[in-house]
Amino acid sequence: MSDEPKPLVLIVDDEPQMRRLLAVSLEANDYRVEVAASGQEGLVLAAQRQPALIVLDIGLPDLSGQEVLRRLREWTNLPVIVLSVLGDARGKVAAFDAGADDYVTKPFNTDELLARMRVVLRRAVREQPVAVFQARELVVDLATRLVTLHGKELKLSVTEYNLLRLFVRNAGMVLTHRHILREIWGPGHDQHTHYLRVYIGHLREKIEADPAHPKFITTELGVGYRFRVPE
């Protein structure tokens, strides 16, 4: 008998019958199972439990499956198989664009789902996802999008948060102006450095003790910016 722990699968589905069916089927095939009935609950459990794989229903009561995927992909590459009653090409493309590893249409054959899970798990690059980044008094929870400084929540705009997330996921690395502009504003904006200067200024005002002498977001003259983790 192998001493390796059984893979943990997180099921995110708002239908109790589907959760029970999947849980029974997976546990009978040597998987451990956690279940969530909403997208937000699924995101929290994904961060807390760090499953080997997520089985995600696309139609959830609070967040769409695509939104759950996008939020997951902000901090982890763990495998996700999407379940949906919609089998159209547009829905599949949207799921894959949001970060799905595979797509299964309801109703489905359990043996087929298990086979797809085995394939996805085999090809997955295993990593320990870092859901919470901390640099001294600054804490960025990438799963919940909560940013605190000295224990108090910071109110950031969507662009400010996206910029901070990009920095903390690449802490210590120099990011060029062009790279940042493309990541935050998209292709076609790589010459709009004034956007970047404005938002770097806004972000420094919120996270730096002395924005004129920043200790987190430092300028690399003529190149870009670097997020430093103070010693």
Image (tube, rainbow, N blue to C red):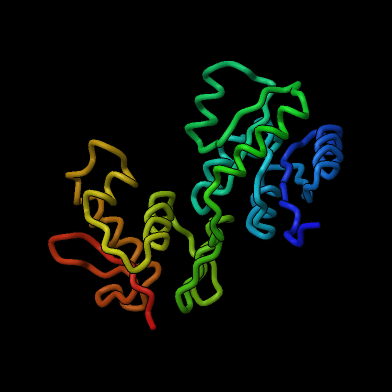
Apparent side of residue 56 relative to residue 76 in the rendered image (left or right): right
217, 133: nearer the viewer: 133
Image vertical order of residue 167 relative to residue 213, above or below: above
Quarter holding the C terminus is bottom left
Vertical arrangement, residue 134 with respect to residue 71, above or below: below
Snapshot quadrant of residue 56: top right
Q: Position of residue 166 (x, y in %)?
A: 38, 56
Image location (x, y in percent) of residue 207? 40, 70
Residue 1 at what x, y percent from top left?
Answer: 81, 57
| Residue at the extreme front | 1
Q: Is residue 110 left or right of residue 172?
A: right
User: What residue sits 76% from the left and 42% below the top?
Assistant: 37
**Left or right: 7 as drawn, with respect to 146:** right
Residue extending farthest left:
222
For the point 33% across and 61% down, the residue is 202
Which residue appears farthest toward the bottom when viewing the image?
231
Query: Which residue is found at the position 27% from the left and 37% from the top?
Result: 187
- Front residue of 189 and 94: 94
Instruction: Depth check: give the residue in front, 228 or 107.
Output: 107
Q: How many marks?
A: 0
Picture quadrant where residue 217 is located = bottom left
| Left or right: residue 230 compared with residue 62 | left
Residue at image coords 54%, 57%: 127
